[in-house]
Amino acid sequence: MATSIPSIACLGVIGRHNNPLHTTILPTTTDPKTGAPAPLRTPLQFSLLLSSTLDVFASRARHASASGTLLSGDFGLLHAVDDRLAAYGWETNTGVKFVVVVDMRGRTLDRTGGSTASSSKSAAAAAAAAASATGVGLREGELKVVFRAMQTAYVRLLQNPFYDPDEAAAGAAGAAALGKRITSRKFAEEMRRIGEVWVPGSVNAL
Amino acid sequence: MEQPFSTSKVTVEYFDPHGVYKLVAPGLIPRLPLRNLHWQSHAGPLRSIDTLHIELAPEGSIDPRPILSPDPFFPTLQRNNSTAGAADSGDGFQTQIGNIAGAVAEPGNQTAGHRNSTPARRHQIPGLRRTPYLKVLLVRCDDNDSYKSSVRQEIRDWIKAHTPSSSSSKKTNTAENHDAFEWLILHVVVPNTAAAAQSRVTGKSEAAEKTSAASRWRTGSSTLLEKLRSDFNSSSKGAADRIAQIRIGVNDVPYDILPRVVSAVPSSYKETAEESEDAWNDLISKMRDLILSSFDMRVSQYEEDIKEKDTQRSLPGWNFCTFFILKEGLARGFESVGLVEDALVGYDELSVGLDMVIRDQAAGESRAAANSLLDFTEELKEATLRAIAAVGGQSSDGGEDEVVDMQASHKGGVDPNFTFDEIPISATKKPYRDLILENKVSVLDFRCYIFARQIALLQRLGNVWSSREELLAKLREQQESVIHGVAPRAPPPKQAENEQEDLSMLAEICRRTLEFIPSVSQVMRNDIQAALARDQDTKDSKLPPVLLEPAAGEVIENLVSAFAFSIAQQILAQTETKALPIPPSTVAPSDGHEPKAAIPEPKTMMHPARKSSLRVSTGPTGMRPPPSPNVFPGPGQGAAAAEHQAAKNSVFLKVGLEELAGRRAELYVLARNILEQCGKKRGWSDGWAGVPVVGEASMIDMVEISLDEDSTPAVDVDQPRHGLAALIAGLDNKLLRTALDNSDDFYRLYETLTDKALRHFTVANHTHSVQACMADLAILKYHLEDYAAAAAFFWRTTPFFGESGWSLLELSMLVMYSRCLKQLQRKDDFVKVMLKLLSKASAAERDRQNQRKSLHLGKKKEVDYPDNDVIKGFLGDLLSETKQLTTEMRVPLSSFFSSVEVDGTLEYHDGRDGFTVYLKMSSLLVDELKIEKARARMVGQISGTQREVWLELSNPTTVKPGKNRLKLDSNVIIPGSYEVDRVELRTHNLCLYHERTTSQLTNKPTNFLNAPRVTVIHRLETLDVRMTASDHIQLDKNNTVDIEINCGWNDLLGAEIRVKAATGGLRLITSEATCISMSSESPSFSKPPEAGLFSFGRIPSETAIKIRFPYTLENDFTSISVRIDVSYTTEHGSFVFSRTPSVPITLALGVNVQDVFKHKALLSKFTVSTGSSSPLRLFRSELIGSEIFDTSFGLPPSSSVLVFPRQPASLLYKVKRKSGVAITPKANKTMYLKLYYSVTLDDIVELVQKSVTDALHGTPLQTYTRLLVEAMLPHIEHDLGAFELERAALLSSFPTTCLTGINWAAKLGTLGRGADGQDLCVALGNFLQSWQTQNPTLALPQTTPPEPKSILIPVDIPSIAIVHSADIRLQPPTPASLDSITQLTEKSNSSPALTVNQLTPATLRLKWTRIWDTETTMEEMPDMEFSYEVTAAGDAWLVGGRRKGHFVIPAPSSSNDMSSKAETEADVPLLLIPQREGWLNYPNVDIREIRPADASHPSAGGGGESGGVTPVDGGDPAMQHCETDLRNLGESVRVVPDRERVTLSLDASGPGGGPLVLGVEKRNGGVGGVVV
């Protein structure tokens, strides 16, 4: 049987006012009928999931500010959704939150279908992936590279003079207007790439 | 560290050969547990143990083998235990909480079962064993004799048997040290014995030396206690005292044991209460010290061992299991004395160590076989195989039966082997430690064990209710067993334990569980897979491999799910606490559903209900009244209320409460998600799959999602029957299995779990999660078609997600919400929600469009968005609903349309007067919208007033998605520049409107309504209304204005003209209006004009009507404006035309008159000047005589007269009194001066207008003639100054150069594009330019127009009572000497020449006439008296004669008496002497009226020297009737000197140095002489 290793099911960027800025959903399972890759949940459910993580962000931030800890903004595991999905979070110091939903069995690592997994990873990463496949689970630190990459992408987006983060953030502040989402194609592609490339144990920057 | 209520326990073994334990126990047990122990650890601070529970065990009851799990082969035992702890959590989970310690707590039974099977053996690596820390020998020794004879030896034997060979030798077997213990001898003194009679110490009351003597001699005189001490206490200094004595009171001994009173002991020693207490304290403290010392010994031994093992880690053959057991032993040791945290740290380290080992193993670097863990768990494998077999081999009935008979099969032991039911995580579930020791543990088991231990420790740390309860029960049991029958010697210890549970620890449990479940699921999955793989590799499976693959997958899934679910359940049950207030359920059960209580709850059936005072379940008692389904919970209710409640509770908020609630909620959610996953396989969707997704590509980067997953039921049908079995096989959790039994249960459990989570989240203040749960519930309800409940949830959640920008969620939920409402027939809400939905969808669409615009600039790609299909058709629903509404729904237009643009080009209708405005609007709706009515308002500032024009849609139009053009017509023609500021679309009761607020800047780019200024022009062919001030002005009458209406091409069926003054103070006298026929068939008023309203009947086309009516003006204005509204009907409909023309009313010229009265005639000189800077051309003039007067003029000028501002024209008329006309009061005396003129400026304007019109004629731009002219004229009027006008008038030509250099395109406003696509403004500008170049000058007409303007000025002749004529006539004799001169002068004129000082006689002739008195009739004329006076300057004349005089003019008796006749004229002789030479004016004659003094003026009349008359002052206005015509005025007399010759001496000898006159010769010869 094929062993399965975690892969990213969903990447979300949530703005300062808790407004969604970007969501990328990656297929981590196969459609039972067609056999085509399909995401584990519907986009709506992912949205709901991302939204629910905000509470954890809030409560942890409260906690952190009370105790004066937590400098890195890494919130680690936010939610264990079920035995497959888990949400990890990271917050920048401007209040933008990155959420990564990991499917613990998102990728199969077997002889035939290992193309996705084995294509772009080093031996160490493979070993780590195998290790996590055996049930040690995902360590929180392993997602740091993802968050770093997401932040880099976001910073690049901010460097674009035509992107106005205030406009994007104005959503909740202005009563009626919906928050503007990130519409940059480049950003979306970058997110997708991050989601696809990452395997547990990646140490190099994505 | 300081646990208020420690749950740790140590074992103390007692040996009771004499059966005295039951005597001691009543006193001992209440004094337990031990309190305030302090232990100095080797590496770390002083640890203090508050309480240490002691388990007193009789000898041999302790199984010295390592602690093992309770035997899983005795499930009945477990069941008994679990049922014993019956309690109801009121929870979704009523899993039996783990009686982890409970199982251990009955070692008697257990060991009994075990002794034989597993003999206690020393393992090479000893784990921590439950060996006693302290062994107590209870000794009964009634007297010294028995001590000597038997007891001493007994004790010796015991010590030899039970203590290490030499307690002093530390260097014994290390294994011994792991079990290190201490011992204690307790002498129990039974009353009524000799021993009881002894005092504790000999000679207690006597001298001290006796004691020493006793010790010296060791005689029988020493007490038993002393004997014992000396015999058994170690002699070394530091050794502990191991002897204690307790005396039992008489009353405490049961009668049957009480020995007979020994009479031989008379001096019975009575122990006081204090001493007894001291004795007990002594015992307790000894126990404490000894326990600590043995503990210390053990810990140091363990630590040493661990250190040693740790260093060997890298060596080959190092076994983790061994290390584990060792380290765990330490941890257990810590735990057993209550140092739980230390224990937990140990386990945490072990967990990490395990991870590393597994990782190493996976990486293939396992160094030794000893280190490897099993790949799979045997039991699990069996369970899997069995499940697979159940799927494959048996019929589907088997699977079903299994479900039904679950309970029975368990009891029957059919399937007892491996189950995750109840308590999956328990350290006592399997003999884990054995397995570990034997290196036969699988990864799964290993992890489970560690986790179980961690949880257990955390539970203790958290002072968990369950673990504490059980311990308390134990304690109570202990006490009760003692108490019963016998009165307690000591009061039971106060249960002063802090009941507080440490919530943050509970939260920590949940947190760890949340991390554990995913990882352990993975482990388990691998485990099973490995097992199956091994199975297939080694031996051929009994199952056909074809079946295996899919079935196995299912079974694995099921097993894992069930396991995870069970863990969640267990932890939830274990972390249940009273301290966590959970608000009542917010699940609103609707009326339509039977209450949940009616359905037997699966959980209560399956699990013994745990009693709890905190009942928040949805059960019958706790159920709150269901809200009416038709009533929305108010905003204050529901979630808000729950939150409020939570906030109130937070006054008592404990540390970690929120966190615990949040964690628990997450666990619930996790369990629910597992359930949902399982349900999905069975085709029971939670509804999310079927949720319509309103696409938002910008938000979610979607990846080939096919959304037609809600066809799962169909899949279910298709599946073979065994598939169904496979779905259940392996689901070993009862709750899960029951839930998956049928869909009702499934949904109920799903809902319950979600509701639980929701409530916990509420407490935890996790708003987003609360909303998410609500959304889940809503969707579930929606899926289950419980629309009322779903609507209520949707109502709460939808705005939340909308506010924070989760519009994808919001849209979908709105879709469902609206469907719910539709089902519920709640029309109002439905409409509201639908509007919201549609507007949100539109907003999303707009975003998408914007994005597309920005992204694909220039790329034209029409992408079809299939996602919008879900909201397709909603519009129709909405409209049909709104039709039934009574009130109108007003919705901003911007909700549904992305932009509205007004096309600048108006389309004018051909053949009629209306025009059309096109609105370009792009609809964001996915459906077509049929618009029944549409209106737009244009507003413009036209001639100073705000005018609005409404544009209407002529016939219903369908608005398609995307771009549309809406054609709005208007029949109202009000020329001017407009802006559309309001748009309304109406269909049924739905009104989409847009209204631009006045504050909004029009040029803001984000403005929704993009409305350029449009100019409504007044075409040449259309009906026209013009107003002019009338050409003929009569100054003494009201001025009139002419309104000229030209029908143009309209064949009017009827018209109403309404005029209204637009200038303040202007009053139109419309009742005096006349209709001036321009032609013969011109119509006239169909009705007499009413106030401001003229009505006409049918008017054929190309007809002009002129209406003239006068007006009055209160104030002076240079121009007046009148608003004229024409509403008329043609065969094309009714039209309205309106304009407010303004006409100048200043007079173009001014006339002054100067009258000169003569005796017979009046000369009037009219001075005509211009009224403005423009020159005038005066064509003709006439003075129209009146009844009395006749006028005459000289020769008229041959051509017209130009009047310039600085050069007025004079006209002189001679007026004569008509003879024979008597003056009557009615006689018309006024004459009129009529002037025919033209103003040069007007000429120029007319000229330009005509020229332009002619130039335009026949060109396509002809229709814009009026516009052009109206644009040009202000320029001409404004730009032409006085100089230009003067020049034009002089040169009779007008240079058009002043019209160059004007940007006509800008002045014309926005006209849009013409037929050829060219901007009309530009075209017109170009035309004007070319016109100007073709006509550099325009010649002003020189001919007199046929009907020039005229003005009629009334001329009144002032009434003068009397006009006098005074005439002075010089009378010769002219001296002869002057003849020559006279002759000279007389030839040229008649004025005489006089010499200086010549006496000249003259006659003053006074005449008068009354003919100019036009006011008084002849009869009324009185006699009048006048005085005259001749005055002259003194240096000019000497006047002699009668210089002053009076004369009386009698009242006329007839008309002949009106003028003086010869007899009534006066000739007054005068003598005039000229005083100097030169031309001298005649003397002046002053005539004044003298009034007779009347009686009323006594002062004036009294003593008047002039005969009672006073001259009338000229200032008296009433009498200023007389005018004097001095005939001599302007005449002069030449005076010459009378000398002929003068002789002068030219030296300066004259007087004053002047010339000396020597002689003068007078003119009258002979007289001459020399005057000195």
Image (cartoon, rainbow, N blue to C red):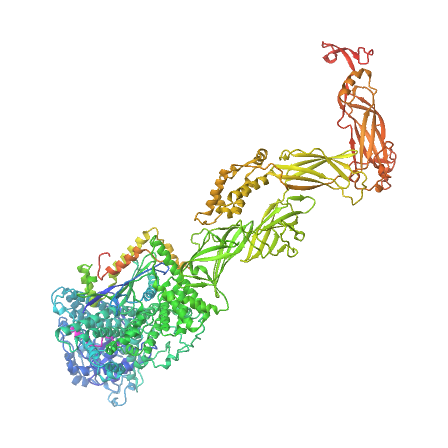
- Magenta region, main secondary structure: loop
Name, please, the residue furthest toward the front: B1080
Whether residue B428 is in magenta: the answer is yes
In the visual, does B1180 lie left or right of B1436?
Answer: left
Span shown in magenta: B423-438
Report whether residue B64 is seen. Answer: yes
In the picture, the quarter occupied by the C terminus of chain B is top right
Determine whether A16 is above or below B555 in the image.
Answer: above
In the rendered image, residue B342, in percent from the top left (x then y), is placed at 24, 68
The tally of labels here is 0
Pick whichever, B1382 or B679, lies toward us. B1382
In the rendered image, residue B157, in percent from the top left (x then y), is placed at 15, 81
In the picture, the quarter occupied by the N terminus of chain B is bottom left
Report whether residue B338 is seen. Answer: no
In the rendered image, residue B1097, in percent from the top left (x then y), is placed at 61, 56
Pick whichever, B168 or B1305, lies toward us. B1305
Pick whichever, B1118 or A154, lies toward us. B1118
Determine whether B1430 is above or below A165 in the image.
Answer: above
Pick whichever, B939 or B80, lies toward us. B939
In the visual, does B82 lie left or right of B777?
Answer: left
In the rendered image, residue B1135, in percent from the top left (x then y), is placed at 55, 56
- Quadrant of residue B313 within the rendered picture: bottom left
- Quadrant of residue B720 within the rendered picture: bottom left
Whether residue A94 is in magenta: the answer is no
